[in-house]
Amino acid sequence: MKYISTRGHAERQSFCDILLGGLAPDGGLYLPESYPQVAGQLEEWRGLSYAELAFRILSLFITDIPAADLKAICDKTYTAQTYRWCRPGRQAADIVPLTSLEPDFHLLELSNGPTLAFKDMAMQLLGNLFEYVLDQRGETINILGATSGDTGSAAEYAMRGKHNVRVFMLSPEGRMSAFQRAQMYSLQDANIFNIAVRGMFDDAQDIVKAVSNDAEFKAKYKIGAVNSINWARVAAQIVYYFKGYFEATRSNAEKVAFSVPSGNFGNICAGHIARMMGLPIARLVLATNENDVLDEFFRNGVYRPRTTAETHITSSPSMDISKASNFERFVFDLVGRDAAMVRQLWREVDAGGSFSLAGGPFAARVADYGFVSGCSSHADRLATIRDVWERYGLMIDTHTADGVKVAREHRLAGEAMVVLETAQPVKFAETIREALGRDPVRPAELDGLENLPQRVELVDAKVDQIKGIIIREC
Ligand SMILES: *Cc1c(COP(=O)(O)O)cnc(C)c1O
C-alpha cells in the first residue's frame, strides 16, 4: 500500500515513511492511494477478537512491517489490561464494549483506555509503532505538543517508558480540569516532560509552531508531533467501526448508522474510510457542539473556518475547534480525488478564507457518502445527560451527550444507530454536577488521583524557554 498527498505531490510513500512525519511536503494530508475492498471478508472477521481484527485491517494499510511483527504490536496494544477502565458489568476483553440503551440504539464505549477518552484507541497503537520503527532505524524522536486536555494525556500515556521517545507537552496553566491536570502531571516517567505555560492554549500552540518552523532546531533535536492529522491514528480508528458493526448486528446484510461527536474530523474520517472499504454503514451522523463549522458545511456546502475569537469555549471542550484539520481528507474524496481542486480550495482556507461546494452535484455527493449532521448546545448537553441518566441509569460525558442528541434527531425506524462514546464523565465533572447535581462516577482505581505528587515545570510563554528545556534534557 502506498500513500499519496491530497494536494497531488508526486512521490508515493509507504506507511513507515509517513508514520513519524506530519503533513506531506506540499502541505497536503496523506491518504492510501486506494481503499482496500473487504465486503467479502466480513463473514470471517465477525467472530474475531479486537486485536486480531485490528491486525487484519491494519495489514491492508501497513505493508512495510512484517506480518508477525505487526501482529505482535496489535496483540500488545489491545489488551484487557490496557482497556480495563470499563463500566461495572462490561467485559474489558471486548476492548470496545457495546451497551444497548434501547433496541437499535447503542453506545460503543471507546473510552476505557488509560486516559478515559477515545484518543487512547489510536494513540496506544502509535506508541508501539513509534517504538518499533525507531528501534529498527536506530533513531530517536522528541515529541512536542500543546494540549488543552485529551490529546496531550493520551500521547503521554502512550509514550511513557518507550525507548527513543521523549514527550514535551505544553499545557495552559490552570485551564484544564483538576482531573485532567492530575492525569498528566502525576506521571513520573523519565521521558515525559509536562510544561505548564503562563497563558492560554493558543500561546502554547504558537510556541509549538515557532519551534517546528525553526528548521535547524527541528532537525538537530529531532522534533516530531503526534497530532490528529497523523495517518496512523486515522487507520487505527477504522477498526472500531468494524467491531461496533459486528456487535450491533447479527448478519452482514444489516446496515447501521454511526453518530460521531466531532471536532477535527479524525474520528468520523475513519468511519468514512470504513464505509468506503465496504462496511455496511448506512449513514454517518456528524455531531458538533456550538462550534458548528462542520454542521454548516454538511447543511449548505460552505466550509468557513472560524477565527480564534469566534471559537466558543464550551462544556464539550475537546470539540472546540476553529477549523477541522482532517477535513481535507474527506473533501479530497468528495471532489473525486481531484488534487488540483483541493489545492485551490485550501489556497482560500490557508489565506484565512472559506469555500463553497454548494450547488452542482454537492448535495447528491454528500448523500452518496452517507453524511448527515447536527449541532448541540450547552442546554442540549445538560438535558441529554439528565435524560440518559434518568431513562437508562447511565452516566455519559458531555461529548457523548452531543452525539446522543444529534443521533436522536436522525434515527430511522428499523435502522440500528450506534453512538460513539468518546470520553468518560469523570473528565468533565463540573458539567456533570450541573446536569445531575452529583459527582461523576469514576473507576475505583483512580480514587485519589488528584492527591498524587505532580511533576510539572511552570514557565513563561516564551519560545526560548521551551527550547531551553528541550536542550537541557537531550
Ligand atoms: C478529540 C475528541 C473528540 C473529537 O474527535 P475528532 O477526531 O477531533 O473529531 C470528541 N470527543 C472527545 C472526548 C475527544 O477527546
Image (tube, grey):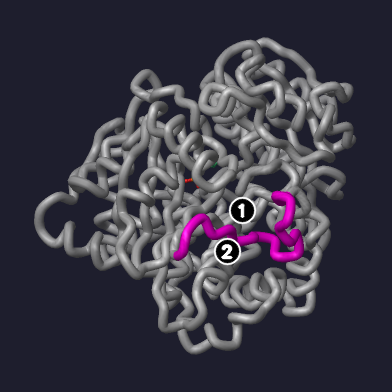
Q: Which amino acid does label 2 sit on?
A: Tyr
| 93 is within the stretch colored magenta | yes
What's the mark number on residue 240? 2
Other residues around mark 1 within 10 Å, as few (<14) / some (14–19) / many (≥20): many
Q: In this view, does 434 lie above or below 368?
A: above
In screen coordinates, is 212 left or right of 454? left
Expressed as whole percent of the image width and height from the top left, the position of residue 430 reads 59, 22
| Residue at the image position 51 percent from the left and 27 percent from the top | 435
Q: Nearer the viewer, residue 408 or 140?
A: 408
Q: Is residue 328 above or below residue 432?
A: below
Q: Say whether mark 2 is within 8 Å of ligand 1.
A: no
**Pointer 1 residue:** 110
The C terminus - image quarter: top right
Q: Is residue 287 above or below residue 65?
A: above
Q: Which amino acid does label 1 sit on?
A: Leu
The N terminus - image quarter: bottom right
In screen coordinates, is 432 left or right of 328? right
State yes or no: discs 1 and 2 in contact (Cβ < 8 Å): yes
Expressed as whole percent of the image width and height from the top left, the position of residue 100 reads 54, 59
Q: Nearer the viewer, residue 47 or 228?
A: 47
Q: Nearer the viewer, residue 227 or 113?
A: 113
Expressed as whole percent of the image width and height from the top left, the position of residue 18 reads 59, 58
| Residue at the image position 39 percent from the left and 43 percent from the top | 405
Expressed as whole percent of the image width and height from the top left, the position of residue 177 reads 65, 23
What's the mark number on residue 62? none
| Residue at the image position 75 percent from the left and 48 percent from the top | 85
Q: In which quarter of the image is residue 395?
A: top right
> Which stretch appears magenta?
86-103
| 162 is within the stretch colored magenta | no
